[in-house]
Amino acid sequence: MHELGAIDEGKVIDWGKTSEEYAKYRPGPPISFYEKLKEHGIGLNNQEILDLGTGTGVLARQFAKQGTRVTGLDISEEQINMAKALAKRDGVDVKFFTSTANVIDLESDSFDVVTANQCWLYFDKPKAIAEVKRLLKNGGIFSTSHFCWMPLVDEIAAKTEELILKHNPAWSAHSYSGNIPKLPSWAEGHFNVRELVMYDEPIKFTRESWKGRMRACRGVGVVMNDKELMAFEQDLDALISDIAGEEFEVLHRIDAHIFEPIN
């Protein structure tokens, strides 16, 4: 994810196409992730947190459950509408609105923490960095994080990626190595790394939830038309029947850089 580009050649990436699948089948990092963030000062009671690229509000809603005051933004109106519906379902109060991360209509020095999970690669980084610095309070912290399966060590992930590439050769988000830089190149001169969190955890799936997870994948439901998606899912059904049971685990790597801005 750290070396991944923001586009796949010839493909329009529209996360709004998969808002329903995203909400149901991409619940985000496991609870262990939030426990580790709390150990490093993120997600504390009464903190003011801004979640960039919030999608369906995965991080935002969990932070709200922990007693933080959360604002979430996303460029996709469909994603924001789903985030609002899920927050209402969960009984949590989150301020969601549609916006890019390049120009954010919020007051400076407003947040203790700014987070960006699985989305930083899509932003215009110089503009987003300037906004993060502007919006953070003095002493505030910024975190980028990822939650990715490990295709080089997990058979189900590897075989599924082979199938995605068969149906969508332009997909570039494959063969993730799991290598995490101590300081990403884009952060040089802008942020110091306070902490780097990195660990692996097997995540449970059923055949149905793995299919749903693929529909909410950048290389599948986000870009495929109905006919292409049907053909892919038929092949995926056959693959999972061959290599896995009704329930199985897929190894994931979870990482989070926790930054302090350089003034």
Image (cartoon, rainbow, N blue to C red):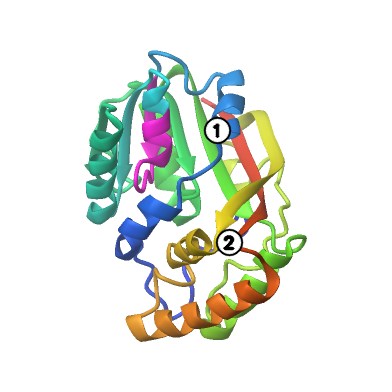
Residue at the top extreme, as displayed: 46
Residue 4: assigned label? 2
Task: Residue at 37%, 73% (x, y): give it.
Answer: 12
> Does residue 103 appear in this view?
no
Residue 57 in magenta stretch: yes
Tag 1: residue type?
A: Ile
Task: Residue at 68%, 43% (x, y): give it.
Answer: 201
Residue 31: assigned label? 1
Closer to the N terminus: mark 1 or mark 2?
2
> Does residue 84 appear in this view?
yes
- In the image, which residues are magenta? 48-62
Residue 4 in magenta stretch: no
Whole-angstrom CA distance, mark 1 to mark 2, is 26 Å
Residue 118: assigned label? none
Residues under numbered marks 1 and 2 in contact, where contact means CB atoms less than 8 Å apart: no
Task: Residue at 60%, 37% (x, y): give it.
Answer: 256
Q: Is residue 85 left or right of residue 128?
A: left
**Image height of 78 relative to 132, above or below:** below
Of 181 and 149, nearer the camera is 149
Q: Position of residue 146 (x, y in %)?
A: 57, 46
